[in-house]
């Protein structure tokens, strides 16, 4: 094994965040660089793959605005979803290309990392590290206390809505170590929710997103455990990709299960209209004027257009925009169709982003847009509705290109979640939870049509906001 010994870096590293493709054996994985040198890189894995599952050797393609760089690599260390690699036979021209990236990319040098550079232990713990350990201990104590007392607390709370979530392995490790999972109940109560008409709780599975994505049996157990623990709940709101996992496990999403798609459609439709207004204010161009000279003023793009929600949102947007560009790697070939009098382009080509300045992001993870970053035009406004959201390094890359990045949330004067979700404020409502809250308040007739649901949501006091991403995201 190449990863048993210590590896000493011989080249200066730079803080460069670029999309990568790793090819090993017969597998191909999307990743991104955490830092880069002419001799190797530290890489964060994006796909659902653990570092120990990768072969010791393979081929890497580094994507940059100056062109792709492809070279063989060897793995030098593995850590959760991060690997370190050494370029095993980089040519002189490839080294020159890397040097060009370092000269032109707005980056800084990376300070030594005692763990990844092979040191056994840091000599002292920083105040930040001590603070984090204290915060982890506090969270563990709170989680354990609430869940031990939950048989009594649930009679006081009497939840009507349950928000069922999950976390990535990284999310879970940020909240509690692996050993803590072994003493947790199968469904962990994580927060209290309230609004004008509903009381509820947010709960989490002990299974990670990666486990749920690959094991239908664990998905079935999670849904079964939810219904067993909360037999009288009116609505179960399934977060993010959980509806897709549930259907793949052969479970039909019928009441009291709620897939949350209509709530997300409301949030993103309202976001689209708000970013259109922002663009109009900046350019003095409306959706119905000057269309011949500025055709992008009436167009909008969806990244993730082939998804469960993105494909439905296209129909909503065609009512307001003359052109809708649906971008998704799942589209085999580019095609166009007329829908409600508007032109819809289905494509996997990121170059199509040059035809618009309004973009909605509905990919599985925010940083799935990394291969598209180079195609965004200055002046583009993005609304992000992903979890995990578009990370700070990617947002900084976009901002340096003149792209305005916003996070989509729903809010209400009567809503609150305690403690708040990571990367959200206490009054921020994820779109997937909104549907359950509206249905609990109004009944199933709200789902008669998108227009009905949008109207009922506003009557209940919910509105969409474009906010800046929190500092912890």
Image (cartoon, rainbow, N blue to C red):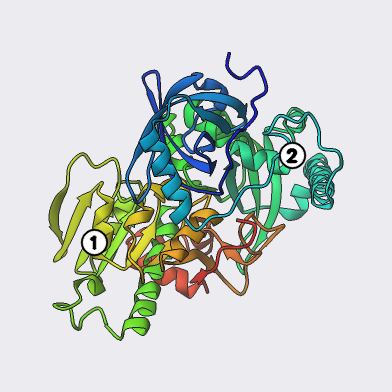
Q: Position of residue 13 (x, y in %)?
A: 58, 43
Between 107 and 419, the one lying in front of the other is 107
Which residue sits at x=39%, y=73%? 275
Q: Secondary structure at mark 2?
A: loop
> Dividing the image into 4 quarters, which one contains the N terminus?
top right
Instruction: Name the residue at the right extreme.
Output: 124
Crowding near the residue tagged with mark 1, few <14, some 14–19, many ≥20 C-alpha atoms within 10 Å: many
Numbered marks: total = 2
> Dividing the image into 4 quarters, which one contains the C terminus?
bottom right
Between 449 and 273, the one lying in front of the other is 273
Residue 463 visible within the image? no
Reading the image, the residue beneath label 1 is: 324
**In this picture, residue 245 sits left or right of residue 341:** right
Which residue sits at x=67%, y=23%? 6
Q: Which badge, 1 or 2, is on the more N-terminal residue?
A: 2
Crowding near the residue tagged with mark 2, few <14, some 14–19, many ≥20 C-alpha atoms within 10 Å: some
Between 250 and 387, the one lying in front of the other is 387
Residue 172 visible within the image? yes
Instruction: Name the residue at the top extreme.
Output: 1
Instruction: Indicate the quadrant where residue 297 lies.
Output: bottom left
**In this picture, residue 314 sits left or right of residue 220:** left
Q: Secondary structure at mark 1?
A: strand
Q: Which mark is residue 361?
A: none
* Looking at the image, residue 46 lies above or below residue 214: below
Q: Position of residue 310 (x, y in %)?
A: 33, 52
Reading the image, the residue beneath label 2 is: 176
Question: What is the spatial separation of the Cα atoms under label 1 and label 2, in whole angstroms?
Answer: 43 Å
Q: Position of residue 463 (x, y in %)?
A: 49, 72
């Amino acid at each position: 094994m190449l990863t048993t010994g210590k590896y000493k870096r011989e080249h200066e590293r730079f803080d460069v965040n670029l999309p990568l493709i790793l090819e090993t054996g017969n597998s191909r994985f999307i990743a991104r660089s955490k830092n880069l040198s002419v001799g190797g890189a530290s890489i964060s894995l994006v796909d659902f793959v653990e570092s120990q599952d990768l072969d010791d050797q393979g081929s890497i393609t580094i994507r940059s605005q100056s062109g792709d760089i492809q070279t063989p690599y060897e793995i030098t260390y593995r850590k959760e979803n991060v690997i370190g690699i050494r370029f095993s036979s980089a040519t002189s021209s490839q080294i020159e290309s890397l040097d060009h990236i370092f000269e032109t990319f707005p980056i800084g040098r990376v300070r030594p990392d005692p763990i990844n550079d092979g040191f056994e232990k840091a000599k002292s713990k920083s105040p930040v590290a001590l603070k984090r350990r204290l915060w982890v201990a506090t969270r563990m104590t709170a989680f354990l206390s609430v869940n031990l007392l939950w048989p009594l607390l649930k009679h006081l709370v009497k939840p009507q809505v349950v928000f069922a979530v999950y976390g990535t392995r990284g999310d879970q490790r940020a909240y509690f170590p692996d050993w803590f999972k072994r003493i947790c109940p199968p469904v962990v109560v994580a927060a209290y929710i309230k609004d004008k008409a509903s009381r509820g709780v947010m709960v989490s599975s002990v299974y990670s997103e990666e486990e749920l994505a690959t094991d239908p049996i664990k998905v079935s157990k999670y849904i079964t455990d939810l219904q067993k623990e909360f037999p009288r709940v009116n609505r179960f709101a399934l977060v993010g990709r959980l509806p897709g996992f549930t259907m793949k496990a052969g479970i039909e999403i019928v009441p009291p299960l709620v897939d949350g798609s209509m709530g997300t459609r409301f949030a993103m439709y309202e976001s689209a209209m708000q970013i259109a207004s922002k663009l109009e204010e900046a350019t003095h161009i409306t959706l119905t004027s000057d269309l011949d000279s500025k055709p992008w003023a009436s167009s909008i793009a969806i990244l993730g257009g082939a998804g469960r929600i993105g494909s439905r949102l296209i129909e909503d947007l065609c009512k307001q925009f003359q052109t809708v560009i649906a971008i998704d790697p799942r589209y085999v070939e580019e095609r166009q169709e007329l829908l409600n009098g508007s032109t819809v382009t289905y494509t996997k080509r990121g170059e199509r982003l040059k035809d618009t300045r309004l973009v909605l992001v509905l990919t599985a993870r925010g940083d799935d847009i990394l291969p598209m970053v180079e195609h965004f035009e200055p002046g583009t406004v993005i609304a992000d509705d992903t979890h995990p959201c578009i990370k700070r390094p990617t947002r900084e890359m976009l901002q340096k290109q003149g792209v305005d990045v916003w996070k989509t949330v729903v809010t209400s004067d009567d809503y609150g979640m305690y403690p708040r979700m990571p990367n959200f404020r206490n009054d921020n409502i994820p779109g997937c939870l909104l549907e359950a809250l509206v249905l609990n308040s109004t009944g199933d007739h709200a789902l008669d049509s998108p227009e009905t649901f949008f109207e009922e949501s506003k009557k209940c006091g919910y509105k969409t906001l474009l906010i800046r991403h929190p500092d912890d995201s």
